[in-house]
Image: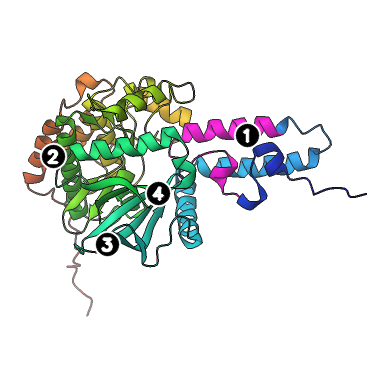
């Protein structure tokens, strides 16, 4: 008599079929690929461990123990910012090589030719594409079939298009078109030929010129965000990862998919708000735990433009220090955002007390104590940039001792 197929704990306990194995850390924890919120990651890992642990005393106790160990490894990797960044880089390369999504080797997609795959996320792919008539290179984002089956994901995608259509600024990514082509939801956006400022966190803290460049980039981001604020859009997820460095035009702010919008017209926003009130999405915190404002930790829906000012201040601090302003596990970071003083910056070459004061003002715990608009942030940063460069510390002269004693004959 056949004993049947071998026991598969991934399928039986976590719902992951053999065709979707081996699993990456995110899939193992039941998360979207590249989830940014470390507290969400920790909670997901704890849930998975509690579920798998319930089988420890049963006939598959050994399999339970082995799977628990793998979940623990995934948790340790993803809740450590440095380990997570390294893992994400490796995973992104693997996903690109696997060719997920539509073929990128010059395949036709409506009126576009797909030239290269730039990025893969859990719900979508981004391609370098070219309009076949206009010969304009663009970034083309497509929603994958799994996400297209989710009303929440489709409305999030359509909402992003509606938000970007409101905005037109040199330091924001422009949208050219949106719709359904070949049965696939897509957005056609400006192609940014560069990487995010997150890559700068791995670099050395070096020259004074680098500090001035970082301040200039932050000022550009503030200009883009200020334009968004003037159109009733609050980003809520300002971080180095959402600031893209274009080789021609400087910094461009990306990542408006979960922005808070004042009176976004039409059925898209009505559907979105209805979905946000659903049990599975209500109360979800929006934002990267390394850069989120204290008031946003309590109420993501009730924030104003000053939450973005805090996020940009944390981003500027991180770019200057080459690490996020606060460290530790997610609960520790939350506590520090709410109660700890911002880290000192004047020990960094090229950073003086005036620049530190600007950054610390942006990172004030109370919104009322921060700069009140991105215009104020721009004025402060521009004023600092117009100052003479901070001179390097003077070196003490080395005394020269001359022996004037008469020499013996």
Q: How are the residues colored?
A: rainbow
Image point (41%, 20%), residue name: 277
| Lower position in the chain sequence, tag 3 or tag 2 | 3
| Lower position in the chain sequence, tag 3 or tag 4 | 3
Q: Which of the two discs, 3 and 1, sits closer to the camera?
A: 3
Image point (34%, 31%), residue name: 292
Q: Determine which residue is flagged by label 2.
A: 381
| Lower position in the chain sequence, tag 1 or tag 4 | 1
Q: Which of the two discs, 3 and 2, sits closer to the camera?
A: 3
Image point (40%, 49%), residue name: 183
- Region of the chain picked out in magenta, as a range: 23-52
Q: Are marks 2 and 4 in contact (CB under 8 Å)?
A: no
Q: Determine which residue is flagged by label 3.
A: 130
Q: Determine which residue is flagged by label 4.
A: 183
* Distance from Cα at disc 3 to Cα at disc 1: 43 Å
Q: Which of the two discs, 2 and 4, sits closer to the camera?
A: 4
Q: Which of the two discs, 2 and 1, sits closer to the camera?
A: 1
Q: Determine which residue is flagged by label 1.
A: 48
* Distance from Cα at disc 3 to Cα at disc 2: 38 Å
The local secondary structure at tag 2 comes to helix
């Amino acid at each position: 008599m056949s004993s049947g197929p071998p026991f598969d704990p991934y399928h039986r306990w976590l719902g992951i079929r053999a065709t979707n194995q081996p699993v990456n850390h995110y899939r193992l924890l039941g998360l979207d690929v590249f989830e940014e919120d470390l507290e969400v990651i920790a909670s997901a890992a704890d849930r998975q461990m509690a579920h798998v642990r319930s089988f420890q005393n049963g006939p598959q106790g050994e399999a339970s123990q082995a799977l628990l160990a793998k979940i623990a490894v995934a948790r340790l990797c993803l809740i450590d910012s440095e380990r997570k960044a390294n893992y994400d880089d490796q995973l992104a390369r693997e996903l690109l090589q696997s060719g997920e999504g539509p073929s990128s080797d010059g395949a036709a997609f409506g009126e576009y030719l797909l030239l290269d795959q730039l990025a893969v996320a859990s719900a979508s792919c981004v391609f370098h594409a070219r309009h076949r008539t206009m010969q304009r290179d663009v970034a083309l984002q497509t929603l994958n079939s799994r996400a297209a089956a989710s009303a929440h994901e489709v409305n999030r995608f359509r909402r992003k298009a509606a938000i970007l259509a409101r905005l037109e600024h040199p330091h924001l990514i422009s949208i050219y078109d949106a719709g359904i082509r070949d049965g696939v939801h897509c957005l056609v956006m400006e192609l940014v030929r560069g990487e995010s400022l997150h890559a700068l966190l791995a670099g050395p803290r070096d020259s004074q010129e680098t500090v001035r460049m970082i301040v200039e980039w932050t000022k550009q981001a503030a200009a883009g965000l200020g334009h968004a604020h003037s159109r009733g859009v609050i980003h809520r997820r300002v971080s180095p990862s959402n600031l893209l460095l274009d080789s021609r035009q400087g910094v461009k702010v990306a990542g408006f998919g979960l922005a808070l919008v004042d009176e976004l017209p039409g059925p898209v926003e009505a559907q979105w708000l209805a979905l946000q009130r659903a049990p599975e999405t209500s109360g979800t915190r929006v934002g990267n735990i390394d850069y989120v404002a204290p008031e946003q930790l309590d109420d993501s829906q009730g924030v104003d433009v000053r939450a973005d000012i805090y996020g940009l201040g944390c981003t500027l601090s991180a770019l200057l220090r080459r690490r996020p302003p606060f460290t530790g596990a997610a609960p520790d970071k939350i506590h520090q955002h709410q109660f700890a003083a911002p880290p000192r910056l004047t020990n960094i070459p090229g950073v003086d007390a005036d620049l530190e004061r600007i950054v610390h003002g942006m990172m004030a715990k109370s919104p009322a104590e921060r700069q009140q608009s991105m215009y104020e942030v721009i004025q402060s940063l521009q004023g600092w940039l117009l100052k003479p460069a901070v001179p390097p510390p003077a070196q003490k002269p080395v005394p020269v001792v001359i022996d004037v004693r008469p020499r013996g004959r």
